[in-house]
Image: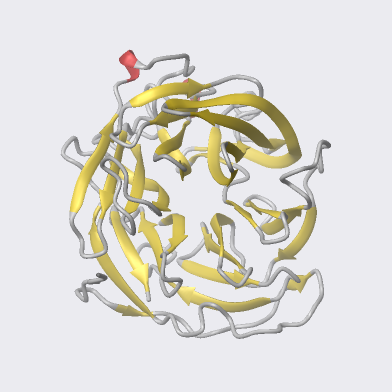
Amino acid sequence: MKSWGRAGVVAAAVVVFGATTAGGAVGRAPFLGPLNTVSPIASTVPANGDVNPYGTFVVRHSVGKLRRGHVLVSNFNNAQNQQGTGTTLVQVSPDGAVSEFARIDPSTLPGPCPGGVGLTTALTVLPGGWVVVGSTPTTDGTSDTVQAGCLLVLDSNGTVRETIAGDGINGPWDMTAVSFGNRDELFVTNVLNGTVDGRGAEVDQGTVLRITLCRHGDAPPQRIATTQIGSGFGEKTDPAALVIGPTGVGLGHDGTLYVADTLANRIAAIPDAVHRTTDAGTGTTVSTGGSLNGPLGLVVAPGGDVLTVNSGDGNLVETTPAGDQVAVRTLDNSGSPAGAGALFGLAVDLDHDAVYFVDDAANFLDVLH
């Protein structure tokens, strides 16, 4: 049963319109229409002090330590606030109970993960309770030491069983997934292709990979193919964010993959993402400008609209597949400018009547309802 706390409740902003769009008309009420209240749920800081929550995923099935309807959160920074050094995943219940799902020791990984462990926004749970989380690690929190990382595969009890590295994986930054029988398709953005050599200058080498996995019984899912379906996205190192590049990804009902192209301040679309065998480059522009302000986290709402959170302010924006920006909600008013850099991962709850999101500024999981 949901039990969202009311302490610190804030009213969300009103619906707004206006943007450069791909055309089309609004055919239904915005998903965000009835959602106007932000409530904090719980701190995401575990016993070891990790901070900077990034990945956010609502568990669909109870298995092992995972509980249906609870929210899994990955931490990017350690207790010293060094970026790319967080090693923990926490699980938060709707009523605010927090447990540590996993604390990953970089020295005992079962396979290669260049650079070690620094958990990113790339987070999903596959059938059978297999948790996949991205690692874009550093040794000192700076881009001088950042390395390619990997995808870590954990079982439902929080034990790392496998690493998936190389073959295009280079700074896995965000991820979404879809499953068909015993096959899983991961869609992963990568932000380190030429980024470090650029020394703060933008380079257009960010990629989107489709990584095909196959599950057999109790064995960890195995990678059987990697296909580059997107490329040429802007990316650069940044002292405040370690790296900026293509971030959130979400799969639409028609197989279109939506990408938050952060530096270009747009939402991109890669058609036929599940089946395509060719590289779509930076895809087509769904929407740009307007209320978008460096979109980061992205999720597709139940009706098919795209929800994104901004890096430049504390706003959540709803955009239709036709490109119309139909609603905005203010999720974070802290900092200067208000909300800048505070928002990353977000996820729609199982009842489709709320949106969970992490507030990096406060190290909290919050809910818009």
- Examine the image and state in which quarter residue 295 appears: bottom right
Give the quarter of the figure containing the N terminus. Answer: bottom left
Q: Quick check: 68 left or right of 309? A: left
Could you tell me residue 181's position as x and y percent? 58, 42
Vertical comparison of 163 with 204: above or below: above
Identified at 51% across, 84% down, the residue is: 33
The residue shown at (29%, 21%) is: 105
Residue 79 sits in quarter = top left
Q: Is residue 362 above or below residue 287?
A: above
State whether residue 137 appears in this view.
no
Q: Position of residue 197 (x, y in %)?
A: 64, 23
Residue in view at x 55 percent, y 34 percent: 172
| Callout count | 0
- 61 or 255: which is nearer to us? 61
* In the image, residue 213 above or below residue 58: above
Q: Can residue 200 be seen in this snapshot?
A: yes
Q: Residue furthest front?
A: 217
Measured as percent of width and height from the top left, residue 348 is found at: 46, 64
Q: Is residue 263 left or right of residue 284?
A: left
Colour setup of the view: secondary structure
Q: Quadrant of the C terminus?
A: bottom left
Q: Work out whether 158 lies above or below 39.
A: above
Q: Nearer the viewer, residue 258 or 171?
A: 258
Residue 231 at x, y = what percent?
75, 38
